[in-house]
Amino acid sequence: MELIIGQIKDPEIKAIAEKIAASERITPREGLLLYTKADLPLLGILSGIARRRHNGSYVFFNSNFHIEPTNICVFNCRFCSYHKPEGDPDSWEYSHDDMLGIVRKFDDRNVTEVHIVGGVHPAYDIHYWGSLIEKIKKHRPSLHVKAFSAIELDYMIKKAGMSYTEGLQYLKSKGLDSIPGGGAEIFDEELRKMICDDKASTAMWLEIHETAHRLGIPSNATILYGHIETYSHRIDHMDRLRKLQDSTGGFNAFIPLKYKKSNNSMSYLGEVSITEDLRNYAVSRIFLDNFSHIKAYWPMTGRDAAQLSLSFGADDLDGTIDDTTRIYSMAGSEEEKPSMTTDEICKLIRTAGYVPVERDSVYNFINVFTL
């Protein structure tokens, strides 16, 4: 590493590389410099140092499936390809029985997690969703229920007249185990007004996740990138997450989510390149030094790009999924019917030079797939 650092000509980038090699935290300004001045091969090397510090040569996945209860939503974010109004022929709305039927399809499978997230339906409050979780847990007590973005939680909790603490305690009592990271989008308040003005604010998103962490409910965090934001906006977003993680330690993973252009009102923007994806993974891994895991969500990126991201800081590929999510396929993802077997995901990880590890939802090891 000393030889590589010695060859860096830019004095600012060289100083940052020395900090990374010494396990020192970089500043927001230094994170911005990595975005704007560091070349991609160097970012791969530096992010590789950071990922090995956290996870060695391991790459994680879990056996999971999704339930998307509805795409009917009270919000209409400009970047969203998923939202449909009530009565639209392409809308859907599952009953409790429908969703329990999805759970039962996996009764003979060794899945460990159900991921429940969808549109913010106007008719359902926290008791409707709490009852669903309770039924799932009664049917399969060992199944980890990761459910509801902060946007869904904000709506259902307020609709029930509860505080965030009361609402999250109630859901935890029904069997909620963790919450996903959706709805973060971009934290800059002015940009948020431009792309998703009517949904829960940045402050609300952060407060809900902080409250969940205080109650012993872990969560993930996301960013939506590749639209109208700048590198400064991305760094600001990650800096707010890093500060909250310093305070609570409750985030399991950070998941960069790429804006996809199909079937939404921001399609004119196009999409950023795969080199920009890799740059973003690398800077995320370096900057978020208190996050143990950076996830490359392969149904969004496609398998090949997800595999490449493992050499730019990512150490988690999400899970097997079994064609149970439509959120990104509706936005034009390369994976129209996302599903991978354990063998397929292990092969993808091994051919990238890493050791596959099946994990549970909070990163306890289930199986290490050594040769």
Image (tube, helix red, strand yellow):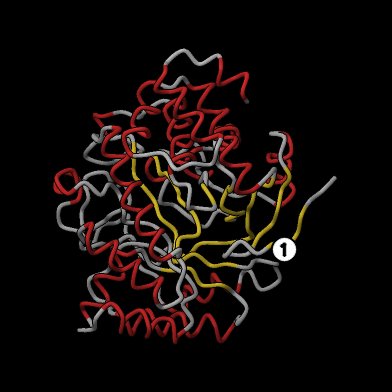
Locate residue 48 relative to residue 216 in the image: left or right: right
Q: Quadrant of residue 359?
A: bottom right
Q: Amino acid at mark 1?
A: Ile
The residue that appears at 14% across and 45% down in the rendered structure is 190
Q: Quadrant of the image for the C terminus?
A: top right
Locate residue 332 relative to residue 361 in the image: left or right: left
Give the image location of residue 233, x and y in percent. 26, 39
Give the image location of residue 208, x and y in percent. 31, 68
Locate residue 223 relative to residue 254 in the image: left or right: left
The residue that appears at 51% across and 29% down in the rendered structure is 18
Give the image location of residue 10, x and y in percent. 42, 15
The residue that appears at 48% across and 31% down in the rendered structure is 278
**Closest to the observer, 309 or 27:** 27
Residue receiving disc 1: 366
In this rendering, the answer to whether 79 lies above or below 70 is above
In this rendering, the answer to whether 194 lies above or below 357 is above
**Closest to the observer, 217 or 262:** 217
Number of numbered discs overlaid on the protein picture: 1
Locate residue 11 relative to residue 20 in the image: left or right: left
**Badge 1 local density, few (<14 within 10 Å), some, or many (20+)?**
few
Task: Name the element at disc 1.
Answer: strand
In this rendering, the answer to whether 252 lies above or below 33 is below
Q: Quadrant of residue 352?
A: top right
**Closest to the observer, 255 or 284:** 284
In this rendering, the answer to whether 363 lies above or below 222 is below
